[in-house]
Image (cartoon, coloured by chain):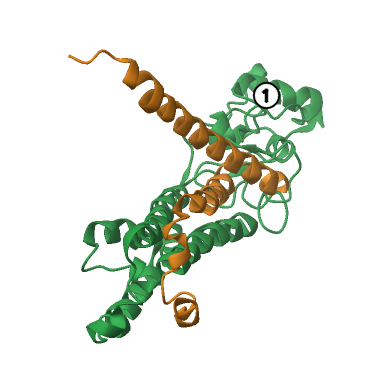
Amino acid sequence: MIALVAYVPFLTPMSVFHDWWYVLIVPLSFGISMIYKALRIGDLGRYWREVAIMTLQVLLGLIGLAVALMILVQLIIPLLPVE
Amino acid sequence: MGSSAPPDPETPKDSPAMATHPAPSPPDEAIFSPSAAFLAWIWPGLGHISLGQKRRGMYIMLGMLFLIGCGVLVGGVDAVDRREDRLWFYAQAVCGPIVFGIDSINQRYIKGLPVEKQLHLKGLGKVNEIGILFIALAGLMNLIVILDALHHRPIVPPGDAAENPPRSGDPKSGTETGGEDGSDHAGPDVVRGRMSGSHSAGASGDDPGAASASVSVSGGGGGGGGRTT
């Protein structure tokens, strides 16, 4: 509670994200998609739709990489013979 | 429309094939604009606004400010620190003076405090890392924005390009054809020249010859194959 009272937005860090840091990949990929799509697409009428699609693509790609690494580290590597 | 398109003055008049169709411009036609690049560094999105693309510039500005704002919100003003995180600061500095302002606040007001008072103002661990990362990525994205503004290729709606083929070196060509803010309100047939490779001849695809054909048959409205999303 003391830490909450002491919190001043944009001045002090948000300590709540110490344990939930991976949630921040959502705004990160959203912001990158906003800038990238603003540069790349020709018809800006579809801008927000394209941003949402790219954000989802980035998130799904990262989740896929995480799952693949988890399978590699926790399932495949333990099966390797130990000398 | 069709054959009513005015002939390009640069086209030889004794060439029957070229007399009715505007000649495709060289594929590497782009506007070199250092002032737009400088404005893009001064304030994100300002470079594209100065090139007549207000809506695109506003979206760029919104995205940049979103990333920088999230970085400072998560990591505090300590997310920008030119002394302790020098290498990160090089990437962050591409965002422009806004980052120098944040660093100035950090150096003057946070670093000047006694150590006990700095404890809850200083970002530590993952929060600090991610705050730095947000702003550094904003800087790297702004580098792309600056390069795009520096070497700008105009956006040409196919119909307009068929009637008014842009001239080489004309900074207004194609940037003000889609509405008050450039091509932003243009329809779905808008083609970004940089994707198609035949941007200035009113191409609706990758083939300049096909572009000329579409001029005489359908007024250049067919397809949007040059656009990538």
* Dot 1 amino acid type: Ser
Q: Provide residue B96's location: percent of width, then percent of height.
A: 38, 65
Residue A25 lies, with reference to residue B46, above or below; the image says: above
Along the line of sight, which residue is nearer the eye, B37 or A75?
A75
Mark 1, residue position = B212
Counting every numbered tag in the picture gives: 1
Residue A5 lies, with reference to residue B32, above or below; the image says: below
* Residue at image point 71% right, 24% down: B20
Along the line of sight, which residue is nearer the eye, B150 or B16?
B150
Residue B15 lies, with reference to residue B145, above or below; the image says: above
Q: Which chain is orange?
A: A
Q: In the structure shown, which secondary structural element does the residue marked by tag 1 occupy? A: helix
* Residue at image point 32% right, 73% down: B122
Q: Is residue B86 left or right of residue A12?
A: left
Specify the quadrant of the image occupied by residue B181: bottom right
Along the line of sight, which residue is nearer the eye, A21 or B97?
A21
Along the line of sight, which residue is nearer the eye, B183 or B105?
B105
Residue B45 lies, with reference to residue B3, above or below; the image says: below
Q: Provide residue B17's location: percent of width, then percent of height.
A: 66, 17
Q: Provide residue B108's location: percent of width, then percent of height.
A: 28, 84
The image quadrant where one finds the C terminus of chain B is top right
* Residue at image point 40% right, 52% down: B137
Specify the quadrant of the image occupied by residue B97: bottom left
* Residue at image point 67% right, 47% down: A47
- Subunit ID for the residue under disc 1: B
Chain B: drawing colour: green
Q: Is residue B120 visible?
A: yes
The image quadrant where one finds the N terminus of chain B is top right
* Pointer 1 local density, CA inside 10 Å: few below 14, some 14–19, many at least 20: many
Q: Is residue B128 left or right of residue B114?
A: right
Q: Provide residue B194's location: percent of width, then percent of height.
A: 53, 36
